[in-house]
Image: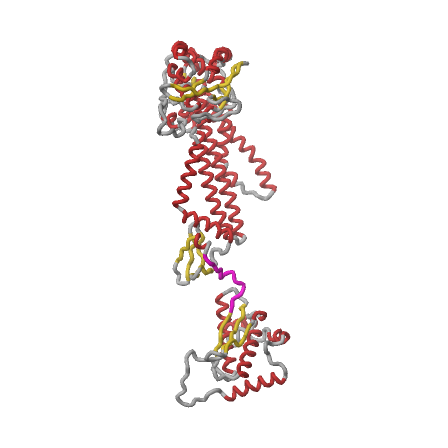
Amino acid sequence: MGHSCAHHGGAGPASALRNRTMFYFPKATLGFFLSIAAVVLPAPTALTQSIQLATPAASTSATPTDPLGRNTPSNSVLGFLKAATSGDYSIAAQYLQMSPAHRQAEGEKTATKLKFVLDNGFVGNYSRFNQPEGTPQEGVSLGHQKLGTISAGDVETDLDMVRVSDPNAGKIWLISSDTLAKLPELYDQAEARQVASKLPGFLVRHDLGGMPLWQWLALLVATPFAAALGWLVLAILEIPLRWWARKHGHMDVANWRSVSGPAWLLTGTLIHQAFVAKLRLPLLARHYYFQITSIALILSATWIVWRVVRWSLHSVRLRALSRGHAGTGSLMLLGERILKAIILIAGILAVLGNLGFNMSTALAGLGIGGLAIGFGAQKTIENLFGGVSVLGDEVFRVGDVCRFGDRSGTVEDIGLRSTRIRTEERTLLAIPNGTVATINLENLSRRDKLLLKTNLSLRSETRSDHLRFVLSELRRLLYSHPKIETTTVRVRLTDIAAAAPSVEVLGYVLTQDFNEFAAVREDVLLRMMEIVESSGTGLALPAQTLYISRDAGLANDKAESAVQKVAELREGRKLPFPDFHKEEISSFKGSIEYPPKESALRQNEDGAGKNR
């Protein structure tokens, strides 16, 4: 990780040249105290091996391969620090740009001084320079890389890396001779400013994992201090939050409590990092410390965003459901799941990037993998976007009665992949959302009124005046019925060429309930039969009638009565053709008693009226 502050002091070169006794702890399970110890242990530990900076995928034909891993600037610096921390300065010298003779004579001494200067004066983030060809930098020539600055007192220089060709290792990165030329001045200034000389000798002389005991002690002491200070910061921030909630009537602070845990981890880690930045840790230990604590920051931030997204979208979903927008509620649920997946992937990528993996390669791999998944799961993706389209358009909701193509039923669930329908046969029908988005769909529950339509076929011997009587009485019936919309009534003679005259009857029943519609339709059809019977004619049979003997024929008295009534209407110029006069239509409205007097429903209503 990058570090924004310089570090001075630490163990001197004399102690670094001694034979060191290395102590290693096993994997810690005792909380944050021992986890810090595991973080800063040097290269031989399992943790160090697990967070090796990943090198970009090399070509299978690339030759030769450097056994010291000097293929990127960051790997060269990390390899130097590991070798120097373990006391193997002859290997550490292999990371310096020196002639073979000079390296053999002065290499170990130069490596010792360079480690001391880096531990106490380096500022920068070398771990992000992980490209074999180098990362382009303004003002830096090709084959060079500036990783940061080294300062001690009034002396300052760049940590410059140079790419050279090695006959045995190929193209490798070394710490440049320009940086090494400034090393004597830097070392003199850094040694003159040591703070460790003011501490008890046993805390400075003894080290653990390449780090003096006094720094270990400071790390441990800083942990509860950072935790307590982080809790105090959150408690102070909660005061204006409670005041705002009380002022606006939002007394429930449970949502704040849901993020208090990750927020405590975030603030405590930031405070601990700020303290450690002043602690003058060795560069390698500092690198591992900030790497792991940055992972804690990423996890806590991801945790907070996850909780905030879950709470906010849940609130929006409940608000939409309370207003009857079931489709919007389902869409919010889908959006919440997608956002959570994005947050999780972003958190994982951030952790991998923090560990030094080449994320450009990882993102390219994700792109290729996503393309392969897209080709292999076309139907799944089609259904997913179909579900989003259905939920967004709100063509239907859960509980609506719909017709999907030639199938109809009640919508029970709108899922991510399919919509489930309960049919009239009580079977469960699952239709993929991709199909739902493309087929013709009728929402029967959204009808504002229901259509009543029928055709009456009268007997072939029915006379024209009989037909006029039937037509006028049918119109009067529909105009008079309180449940029929008068403006859309249509009663017309449609055909006489067939075996029997045909009369079309059409009107809208003013209801959205199908059961009520069925009752009104039944009542209207029964009244139609009474009108046909009273006209002296009858309904045509669906088959031909063969008269073997002479029958009674039409009811002459009723037929004459119907003809006489039509004649009276004609003489009085009140014949209702092509329709009744508007004033008569208005007078008809509600003149029919519905339900009829003999209906049990009417008796219940009359009894209720008497009770009132």
How has the structure been colored for display? secondary structure
Tell me the residue at 52%/16% (across/down).
Answer: 156
Compared to 539, does 348 lie above or below? above
Q: How many numbered marks, from 0 up?
A: 0
Compared to 171, does 384 lie above or below? below
Looking at this rendering, what residue extends furthest in the top direction?
105
Task: For the C terminus, give its image quadrant.
Answer: bottom right
Q: Is residue 441 in the magenta section?
A: yes
Q: Is residue 19 in the magenta section?
A: no
Where does residue 195 sit, x and y in percent of width and height?
A: 49, 14
Using the rendered image of the protein, determine whether residue 171 is visible from the camera's viewpoint: yes
Q: State which quadrant residue 112 falls in.
A: top left
In the image, which residues are magenta? 439-451
Where does residue 103 sit, x and y in percent of width and height?
A: 40, 12
Q: Is residue 296 left or right of residue 591?
A: left
Where does residue 542 sit, x and y in percent of width and height?
A: 42, 78
Compared to 107, does 513 lie above or below? below
Q: State which quadrant residue 483 falls in.
A: bottom right
Q: Nearer the viewer, residue 469 or 492?
A: 492
Using the rendered image of the protein, determine whether residue 225 is visible from the camera's viewpoint: no
Tell me the residue at 44%/25% (across/down).
Answer: 133
Compared to 154, does 433 lie above or below? below
Tell me the residue at 49%/87% (across/down).
Answer: 555
Tell me the residue at 55%/83% (across/down).
Answer: 465
Q: Nearer the viewer, residue 69 or 171?
A: 171
Where does residue 84 sit, x and y in percent of width and height?
A: 40, 17
